[in-house]
Amino acid sequence: MREWTPGFENDQTPNEELYTLAAMRPLAPRALGGLVLLWALVSVVSAWQAAAARGPDRVTALEAGFRALAASAPASGDIGFLRHYEHPDSPDDIRDYYVAQYAFAPRLVARRTDVDLLIVAQGAAHPDRDERLAGFALVASSPEGHRLYRKLIR
Amino acid sequence: MIREAIALLVPASAIVLFAPSLRSACGRSRAAAAALALCLGIGVSSVTTAGLIASGLTPRDGIFVVTDVVIWAIVGTTGWWLWRRNARSVSHTHPPVHARSLNGLDWIVRLVFAAVAAIALGVVATSFRVAPHGDWDAWAIWNLHARFLFSGGDRWRDLLMVDWSQPGYPLLLPASVARVWAYAGHDTTAGPAIVAIVFGVTTVTIVMSTIGLERPRAWIAGALLAGAGSFLVQIPSLCADVPIACFMVVSLAAACGREGVLAGRETSRTAALVSGGAGAMAAWTKNEGLVFVLVMLLLVAVVTVRRGGGRWLSWWIAGGAPMLAALAWFKLALAPPSSWFAQSPLVYAGLLSDTERYAVTASLMAQHLWRWGAPLAGIIPLLALAAVWLSVVGGGAMRMMAALVALMFVGYCLAYLTTPFDITWHVTTSFDRLLVQVWPSLVLTVFFDETRLNRLEYA
């Protein structure tokens, strides 16, 4: 690289001129710049429309519901999560489990029932009678219908 | 929000005091210096945060904030003292400033940029309002890890047991969010949001400053960069792709700028430290950053061999060493092994010799490359063609920038070809975000004017 010397501004090689957009014919770079700005405007307005049209976020509601239950749990330890009685590996059930872990962190949440505390997401337990909840007592519930159970000491 | 902002300003202020020559690293503007201080402050403080947590301090406790403030006060005071001592013995001579008045074209370009930036901020604010916890990866990985770090106490390592949450991902982002929450006093949704906004704004500022804020093309590049919907939506997603994109472009800009590795006698220690440090921060942010830091090291080494400048390479390595040491500690001592590296060489050879995988990968990547930036598709292929042309007819900086983007792309291709996951699922769910990582570097490559380096224009 050459060192700076006064007047270097006018000392460009043809190669440098070739790749410098500003060295193109006067109108070309302006037209190109105008097109780029137009692209940016259309693109950002489109992003705005997409953001404004976005529906309510299910995760936000789920997290708030589980977080309300977390206040009733000890600060650390393992907690169980009841799988959906009918669709235990559905995307919704997995999402609910992940959000429960997010809301209950730093506690560890596992999809099992051999624990002292058990999270039951809204709709996860059988509506009539769920045998998996035998031996558990309700500790807390959220307005969204999520519940926290504790194993009864026999 | 004020406490969260203070958390970011504390290390940034200390870095400004410690390295007053920071503004020379990427474009010689105050905006660049502020942006650099903010993003480097986040990067360095994530290491101190991880260290404090590993040594038993919990961000939820007040003593953590006190300790953090003391650390940065010591850094800032030491830097200020060193600067005062050097200022007596070294006289800084700056070349003359070439200021010119703005013409009509300048004003139009700046007004359009302002409109794009205002709408972009509106998009980010709207997205935060609708989904304050961000996208799936944000709450299932990054902010989940941050919650373990923030309030896990001596059980913060339990995050490594959540096997579906990518426990091997580095800690820069979760540690930064946990640190911001420490200043806030509790885990707020504003914490990750302010970190994400800082990285988004910093990325645009660095690109524009490196091109030269006095030039219309910088404002056009800024509008293009910030206006791309696919890039923009990744800011409120609260994932790590914009932060890693930021560190990548900072490292590249410092290496190819006026005082970078190509500058011969005018190379500066600050630029080398910033470039190496930011490159390592990319690796400390996300696994793709490891590819980046290796590619950058390769390019810097090649330039060093061809043009001399071993000291610049040494400072580059010195800048990256602390972050890479933190990464090595995390990866080797704590993180579970990645399923990627658990495959035997024979499996890799089998995957790489499967021609059908090449066809599927190429087809899927081509679709995403074309659609990225929709509704106006094709922007990445167009800029990539421009970058190739500029690298052919341009100088060393252009070639280095284009080579970096190309080699990152090759790295992504290799990752997909050897993925242990279903290729279609893997490409479809991740390639748009990988393009976000190189987008600022690609824009910088196309709009960077190498001849400006020889003209001494100072903002």
Image (spheres, coloured by chain):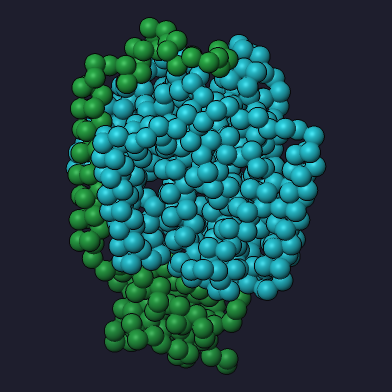
Chain colours: A green, B cyan
Q: Nearer the viewer, residue B229 or B168?
A: B229
Question: Going 60% across and 68% down the picture, which residue do you hit?
Answer: B182
Q: Residue furthest top?
A: A14
Residue B391 to residue B248: above or below: above
Find residue B137 and report its horizontal and vertical position in percent.
42, 55
Q: Nearer the viewer, residue A22 or B379?
A: A22
Q: Is residue A118 visible?
A: yes
Question: Going 61% across and 11% down the picture, which residue do you hit?
Answer: B306
Find residue B188 and report its horizontal and vertical position in percent.
49, 70
Quarter of the view holding residue B83: top right
Q: Nearer the viewer, residue B229 or A69?
A: B229
Residue A15 to residue B239: above or below: above
Q: How many marks?
A: 0
A122 on left or right of A150 = left
B133 on left or right of B156 = left
A125 on left or right of B305 = left
Quarter of the view holding residue B121: bottom left
Find residue A66 and report its horizontal and vertical position in percent.
43, 77
Question: Going 36% across and 73% down the picture, which residue do you hit?
Answer: A62
Question: Going 40% across and 32% down the picture, which residue do you hit?
Answer: B100
A4 on left or right of B220 = right
Find residue B382 and report its horizontal and vertical position in percent.
27, 26
Q: Is residue B388 visible?
A: no
Residue A110 to residue A16: above or below: below
